[in-house]
Image (cartoon, helix red, strand yellow):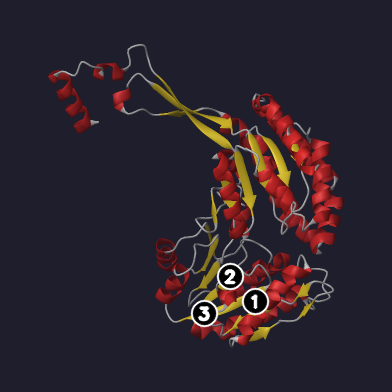
């Protein structure tokens, strides 16, 4: 029955695609502003849903869930007319008298599969881009955040017609049913393992994809950077949402001589920010008992192999709590240093010189983010020149994600394609190349019969054009 409803909804939207495509910038902006009004009207409901799913404090919900979406909407409202304009291009001289431009056209039927860790923001952020680009969308939110998923469905039904945007809830079988359909574009946020499943499904229909995945985003602190500043920023970025953030610092590389001081400063930061985390209304819970068990296994495996728990390690299944945890002396082959943590555990890995730190990063799959703490421009350039990552933040963590002027996305294992702002608009658009030739275009000089004179003309063209 669910599959029949999914097929009916898909057919309904497909029949409406051309009508949605024809809508101009003003009407698209009006839709997005209506979405923003409904978001602000439901602000208390959003805060409540996220508190029930993740025990998020309202301030964190405002900062990390609502603001990124309203920021995307406002940015699109200011720039969408320019984005939609055909982009004129210069021609090679061999095409003199020709005109070339790019048209930005909606891809058509789009599927957004959103995750549970930021269930509001990571569902509606891509949706803003898809609507701005003129697409029809089916959104499948995560079943692990049911309260937010229900709220999303209410919000979308109050804002859009089902012929344009619809929410489909359900378990992985529902996602599988959706992936069987011939969408023109798939946008997925989640783990690399599930990303491979999405990409295989896309291959059946040759659908384009945007994959926002994860990975082990490293932090490098050099030998001179202010440790108090670095510790405060890293602790915040690691513990927001209890570490369940795709761009969270995954592990820290630090000079051997500075490790103990950093750990001491980090403990002070944890105490100042959360006091007693197990009782704090400022600290989120782990999303589910299953995810808590996974984090416990990672932690225990590291301890069994000789890692030292500098702070934390405590957990409580009833409240789905895992304490902010810092590890030292972690064996390089432990699972926690080779699998994305996605929780409030920070392994601290000492290095002797910058070469060792760079080699450590390059020995692992390319991460979604790289964080560099250094005031030395030569050090920063060396790290940038010799590593790969989806994005980089210098002297801070996480905050690059909410800059709508920057493309956000991974590379290889950490993702394919970009989102946010103009780059999100492009992700959901087809860049259609258009070349207009005059009646006697330059290429007519090269039509057969192929004479010696033409041969010389071709050789001259090759040499000079």
Residue positioned 48% across, 68% down in the render: 364
Residue positioned 36% across, 27% down in the render: 91
Q: Quadrant of residue 435?
A: top left
Q: Quadrant of residue 143?
A: bottom right
* x, y percent for residue 354: 42, 74
Q: Marks 2 and 1: CB-CB under 8 Å?
A: yes
Crowding around mark 3 (Cα neighbors within 10 Å: few <14, some 14 to 19, many 20+) is few
Whole-angstrom CA distance, mark 2 to mark 3, is 11 Å
Residue positioned 48% across, 74% down in the render: 222
Which residue, given by chain and number where applicable, does mark 3 sit on?
A: 332
Whole-angstrom CA distance, mark 1 to mark 3, is 13 Å
Marked residue nearer the N-terminal end (2 or 3):
3
Residue 264 in the figure: left or right of residue 387: right
Which residue, given by chain and number where applicable, does mark 1 sit on?
A: 298
Residue 192 in the figure: left or right of residue 316: left
Q: Dot 3: what SS?
A: loop
Which residue, given by chain and number where applicable, does mark 2 sit on?
A: 339
């Amino acid at each position: 029955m669910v599959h029949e409803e999914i097929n009916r909804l898909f057919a309904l939207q497909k029949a409406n695609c051309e009508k949605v495509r024809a809508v101009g910038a003003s009407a698209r902006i009006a839709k997005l502003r209506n979405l923003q009004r409904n978001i602000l009207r439901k602000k208390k409901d959003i805060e409540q849903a996220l508190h029930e799913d993740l025990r998020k404090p309202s301030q964190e919900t405002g900062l990390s869930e609502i603001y990124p979406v309203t920021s995307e909407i406002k940015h699109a409202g200011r720039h969408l007319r320019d984005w939609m304009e055909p982009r004129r291009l210069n021609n090679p001289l061999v095409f003199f008298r020709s005109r070339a431009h790019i048209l930005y056209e909606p891809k058509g039927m789009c599927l957004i599969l959103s995750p549970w860790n930021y269930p509001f923001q990571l569902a509606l952020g891509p949706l803003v881009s898809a609507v701005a680009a003129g697409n029809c969308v089916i959104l499948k939110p995560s079943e692990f955040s049911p309260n937010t998923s229900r709220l999303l469905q209410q919000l979308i039904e109050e804002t859009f017609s089902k012929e344009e945007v619809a929410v489909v809830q359900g378990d992985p079988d529902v996602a599988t049913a959706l992936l069987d359909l011939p969408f023109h574009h798939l946008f997925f946020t989640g783990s690399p393992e599930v990303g491979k499943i999405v990409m295989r499904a896309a291959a059946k229909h040759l659908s384009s994809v945007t994959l926002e995945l994860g990975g082990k985003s490293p932090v490098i602190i050099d030998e001179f950077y202010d440790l108090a500043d670095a510790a405060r920023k890293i602790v915040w970025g690691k513990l927001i949402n209890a570490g369940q953030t795709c761009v969270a610092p995954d592990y820290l590389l630090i000079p051997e001589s500075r490790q103990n001081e950093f750990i001491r400063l980090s403990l002070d930061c944890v105490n100042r920010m959360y006091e007693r985390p197990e009782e704090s209304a400022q600290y989120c819970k782990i999303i589910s008992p299953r995810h808590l068990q996974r984090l416990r296994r990672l932690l225990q495996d590291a301890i069994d192999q000789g890692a030292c728990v500098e702070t934390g390690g405590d957990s409580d299944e009833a409240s789905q709590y895992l304490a902010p945890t810092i590890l030292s002396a972690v064996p390089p082959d432990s699972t926690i240093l080779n699998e994305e943590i996605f929780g409030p555990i920070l392994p601290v890995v000492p290095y002797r010189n910058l070469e060792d730190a760079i080699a450590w990063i390059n020995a692992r799959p390319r991460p979604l983010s790289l964080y560099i703490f250094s005031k030395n421009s030569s050090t920063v350039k060396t790290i940038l020149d010799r590593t790969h990552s989806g994005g980089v933040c210098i002297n801070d963590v996480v905050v690059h994600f909410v800059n709508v002027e920057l493309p956000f996305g991974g590379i290889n294992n950490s993702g394919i394609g970009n989102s946010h702002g103009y780059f999100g608009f492009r992700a959901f658009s087809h860049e259609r190349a258009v070349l207009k030739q005059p009646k006697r275009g330059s290429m007519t000089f090269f039509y057969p019969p192929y004479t010696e004179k033409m041969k010389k003309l071709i050789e001259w063209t090759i040499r000079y054009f």
